[in-house]
Image (cartoon, rainbow, N blue to C red):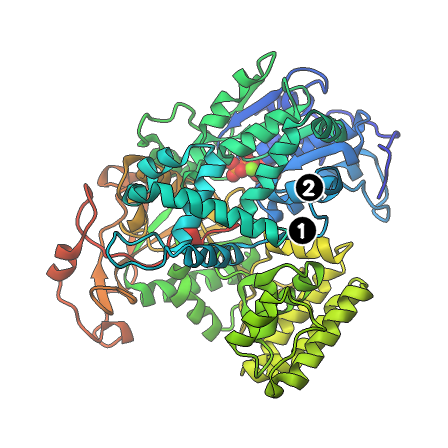
Amino acid sequence: MSTTAPTSLTVEPAAPRLASGVVPDVGTLAGLNESQRAAATHPPHDRALLVLAGAGSGKTSTLAARVAWLVQQGADPQRLLLITFSRRAAGEMAARAARLLHRLAGLPASVAPPHLPWCGTFHGVAARLLRDEARHVGLNEGFTVLDRGDAEELMAQARQSAGLAETEGRARFPLAPTCLAIHSRCINTRAPLAEVLREHFPWCAVHEAALGSLFAAYAAAKRAQHSLDFDDLLLACWHLLQAPASASRLRARFDHVLVDEVQDVNALQADIVHALRPGGQGLTAVGDDAQAIYAFRGADPRHLRDLPARCTPQALVLTLTENYRSTPAILAAANAVIAQAAGGRALQLHSRRGEGLRPRLVTVADEAAEAHGVADAVLAEREAGILLRRQAVLFRTATHSAALELELVRRRVPFVKYGGLRFLEAAHVKDVVAVLRWADNPAARGAAARCARLVPGLGPASVARLLDGGGDLAAFKPPPAARAGWAALAQVMAQLRDEPAWPADLQRAIDWYQPHLERLHDDARVRRGDLDALLRLAGQHGSRHHFVTELTLDPPAATGDEAGPPHRDDDYLVLSTLHSAKGQEWSAVHLLRMVDGCMPADMATGRAAEIEEERRLLYVGMTRAKDSLTLWVPQRFHVTQQRAWGERHLYAPRTRFIGDELLAHFDQAVLTPPSQTGPSADAGPPLLDLTALLGSTWAGGSPGVQPTGSGPGQDPA
Ligand code: ATP
Ligand code: MG
């Protein structure tokens, strides 16, 4: 990695201008339009800069160009902090900026471009800063980061110990995941508990006092285990920025702070950004309030709007209005959808690309027909030369792609799924990572319990005895049946603690785990493939600590098991939740289940603000498409796990966000008439399903659908 800025960079001469005013993209700043170039070359020591612009207008490209330009001006790549939304986005941004730098410097392809070590997510950056600062601030350097599952488990334990789990004689106390959600919202929005309860969890308001003490107990449990949850990472980072000594150390690390997708920061993240760059010098942020989709996690586009005034002098605000991504036909439909947002949208985008085909609105009988239709369309596009990986299928909720996944496996179409089951959530990956986490931090009870439970013969009582004894390996006397299994675990643990070596430690952990893998899983061979993938990943990280922290913060997406893990050069279709698709683009995009109850999701139908967030989510989905966009409208679909109703078919109207007045923007088609023989027509539900209509609980909207399972909480970390 280079430690100094390349000094031999020269700007290539500006390319000749086209009649459109756009400069052809020759891979340097010359490829930017005038506004983009003004943003990319905003003087480094001038006031803060905010680029406020719509989807596909080149915000992220401009940010990457600015990074390259700053380095070209002499900025040290090691002292640039680039905050993006996901690890994938961070990787993409670092690669783009590096490519640009490479070309600007005229370096031969064999020379590695300057490395940008500080490019990551808020949580990832905070974790690294804390690791470095730990010894100055009384934090155990070996602290563990709890993932959501661990945090929930710890909250559940605290809830149990406080006697809050008993329900007799009083209103039921919220379950651990709800307690954690309340806790998280308080921290991320910086709002008092009473306010959070009143605004977002009114049914829990009677428990305010008990929640307050539960949160104190939860904090104490984390302290005892030297553990931080995701929210603590941000909070601790903010605290560091409040103490003069640590604040000046942190500020002195960076000359520039650049933030992408700033519409989705929460109050705490906004405070961190402003504390890192007081006054705003050296701060560049880009965002689009029409794409704000994380209010359900405490984000608020107000922080984007307030940014200029929080800087002294006020930040310069630049806008970009040209969309380079989508055809005018696609853009017109997306613009029409967002124009109906409450309060309207002032900034409408235009595109100079060839008109293109109107987006298709395809009505199909049911989800099976939807899955068939999408698979057919995807394969037809591939025949026409559009690689699978230039196509994507997007959906509101991870479970919406289930039928399609089966269809793709059946047809042997490889795919990856983002925003659904995560790699790290797979039991076998969690098991192996738990071994590393326990080795790192002997006080990590969750990890210890997970490892111990794998040993045959160790029951819950023995595990509790082990943990209560402080997890001391030598002192623990296992029951006779568990002796051999325990000895193997104790041996690998001792090795990992006493002779750490990276990435050899992961290999040791996997070797220990292999017999358990074979014992516990019928598909051990497939799962072993995931562990091998983990090994490959491990090599890219400098230390065990770093690896475990990164994995916990932003795990890579799970591989579609049967379809096999894709490699960089393989071709595979992308399946993604709408939330996980933000910032990305594909030539062809399919949006599944464009029906009320799925879009907007049924759980979001209560408040006007939530409906508006769903509308923006649809806008985000539509604006991912470059050349072709298809919206699928299944007339009915199968719903399982219905508490009150059992398994059933439900009828649903087309999404309310595409009313009849917008149909002119779409080509409509009916793909398959309801089949009398197809597998999904078996029950032959009547045309009007009164029970479903009567069971419809949501306010305001047209009657239609029952809850369909998991919601926004399923989306990416
Ligand atoms: P989003 O709001 O979805 O995050 P964005 O504003 O960040 O979008 P980019 O992803 O940076 O937009 O750019 C969208 C597409 O437009 C990319 O394919 C990019 O290469 C292309 N693009 C951006 N600027 C230009 C330009 N000046 N000339 C040609 N293509 C451009
Ligand atoms: Mg972007």
Please tell me which of labels 1 and 2 falls first in the chain: 2
Residue at horizontal 36 percent and vertical 41 percent from the top: 209
Amino acid at pointer 2: Leu
Q: Nearer the viewer, residue 190 or 423?
A: 190
Looking at the image, is 528 positioned above or below residue 545? below
Quick check: marks 1 and 2 in contact, CB under 8 Å? yes
The quadrant the N terminus occupies is: top right
Q: Secondary structure at mark 1?
A: loop
Q: Using residue 599 as the reference point, say whether residue 446 is left or right of it.
A: right
Q: Tag on residue 130? A: 2
Q: Is residue 55 above or below residue 444?
A: above
Q: Position of residue 515 (x, y in %)?
A: 65, 83
Residue that mark 1 sits on:
143
Q: Amino acid at mark 1?
A: Phe
Furthest residue in direction right, as rendered: 8
Q: Residue furthest top?
A: 313
